[in-house]
Amino acid sequence: MPNILPLLLALSPALSPTTCRQLHRIVVALLAMTGRITQLGLSRWSDKGGSYRSIQRFFHTRIDWTEVQWLFFQLFVYDPDAVYLLAGDESPIGKAGKQTYGLDRFFSSVLDKVIAGLGFFSLALIDVKKRQAYSLSTEQILRTPEEKEIARQRKLKKKPKAQKPAPKRGRGRPAGSKNKNKAQPTLSAELLRIQAQTQKVLLRLKQKLSVAYFVLDGHFGHPFAAAMVRQLGLHIISKMQHNVALFLLPTREQKARQSRRKYGDRLDFAHLPEELRVSSTTQDGYRIEVYQTICLHRHFADPINVVILLRTDLATQRVGHVVLFSSDLTLEAERLIDYYALRFQIEFTFRDAKQYFGLEDFMGIRETSVANAVGLSFFMVNLSRYLLAPLRTLYPGAGVTDLKSYYRARHYVSEMLKFVPEKAGLISCTDLIEHVCRRGLIHPKPKSEPHLERAA
């Protein structure tokens, strides 16, 4: 296993020497400790120099975690031959109390309801070859009073279900309406925040690599998000609603009848044309058909590349479909599907940060303390994935639980050796660590070693 201190010393351009030493003690404690990740817990698992006051000083030090993450990525992760995607997603964290900086109400998709807590938007690079996401930037979502008022007014305007719908207006364009530039729409405050955050990240990426695609979930499958991404110089890959109104390009016959016609026939997802089908496979009692075409949408400025996945249950004949799209008209259907599937890798960074590295456990309430707790959690996710590579040469299939078990065993062994007399003979620390580590491993070695069997 690589020594952690030299890894962190390589980040000295982004961290002061004192902060780097404090971070080393905290990282070692994070990898070894059990239970909730709090400042007091970190001080209990830290070696000499990691007192409670030192931990507090670290969390109250301003750190540019985006610079730290980018520097770590360049030194230990970057592969010049790899293809990278930029992915973004939002994650809420439930918090009690009233004093935490940025406390608001956010929708939790896991709980399927609005919760009180903090919200963060994270940007990550996804390695297509390794199929892993590496967090780069995480910023807290702070809604302005104007945004809250707009959301409140929108909620008040919602009509009750029992009320009869208003009569539809007549055909034709309403009097006094003006043309709108679809390529430069008025972006919401949420999209402006994401755009500003992404611009900062892209300025750093241009120094090392180029990214062509920005992958977002179905929440951003609308023309405003697509326009925001195109303004950044990237192509969007996202998912649309299942009942979206898409139109085919007009045929020659339609153009001959109406020369100024812009839209062709509306795409019917229940009766898709056979000439649009790209592939059809049958697996586990389901038939999956892939269709691809160039479509128009009334609110998109340009044509979009649409891929439709049609899934049929052969036993019941029930049919479901998913609509993916991209602003890159040359992207093949197979690659578009694969790139959108890779978006879920950013969810694993949220899972690991919450489950193993204290993203939901921190007790800080001030702005700097909250930012450091969140930045540290995502930095630990990237670091753990780097440390897992050598560990998997010994324990194939090892995960974060196995990694923490290894460092916990090393912590126990180092504490035990403090009570061994100096003249106790030669003791192999490596054998002791591996022997203790075996008690908590989920993925043991495929073949037992003789010296470990004798020790057992």
Image (cartoon, grey):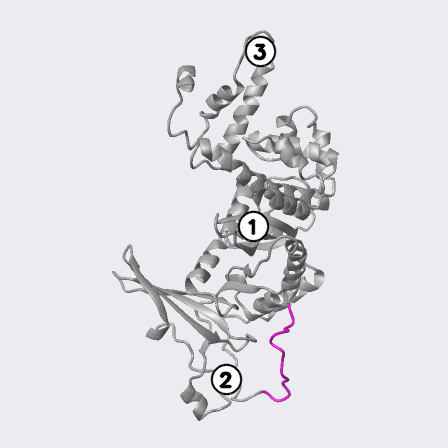
- Taking the spot 52% from the left edge, 24% from the top edge, the residue there is 409
Q: Does residue 424 lie above or below 116 as drawn?
A: above
Residue 425 placement, left or right of 177: left
Mark 2 or mark 1: name the one nearer the start of the chain. 1
Q: Is residue 256 rendered magenta in the image?
A: no
In the rendered image, the residue lying farthest to the bottom is: 257
Residue type pointed to by label 3: Val
Residue type pointed to by label 2: Lys
Residue 192 percent coordinates (x, y): 66, 63
Q: Is residue 243 visible?
A: yes
* Disc 2 to disc 1: CB gap under 8 Å: no
* Disc 2 to disc 3: CB gap under 8 Å: no
- Taking the spot 65% from the left edge, 30% from the top edge, the residue there is 25
Q: Main secondary structure of the magenta part?
A: loop
Mark 3 or mark 1: name the one nearer the start of the chain. 1
Give the crowd class for mark 2: few <14, some 14-19, many >=20 residues within 10 Å.
some
How far, Cα to Cα, is label 3 from label 1?
Answer: 48 Å
Residue tagged by mark 3? 420
Q: Which residues are magenta?
A: 174-187
Q: Secondary structure at mark 3?
A: loop
| Badge nearest the viewer, 3 or 1 | 1
Q: Secondary structure at mark 2?
A: loop
Observer-nearest of 417 and 17 = 17
> Considering the image in quadrants, where does the C terminus appear?
top left
Q: Choose top left, top right, bottom left or bottom right for residue 65.
A: top right
Q: Is residue 178 rendered magenta in the image?
A: yes
Residue tagged by mark 2? 262
Residue tagged by mark 1? 80
How far, Cα to Cα, is label 2 from label 3?
Answer: 84 Å
Q: Does residue 54 lie above or below 325 as drawn?
A: above
In the rendered image, the residue lying farthest to the front is: 81
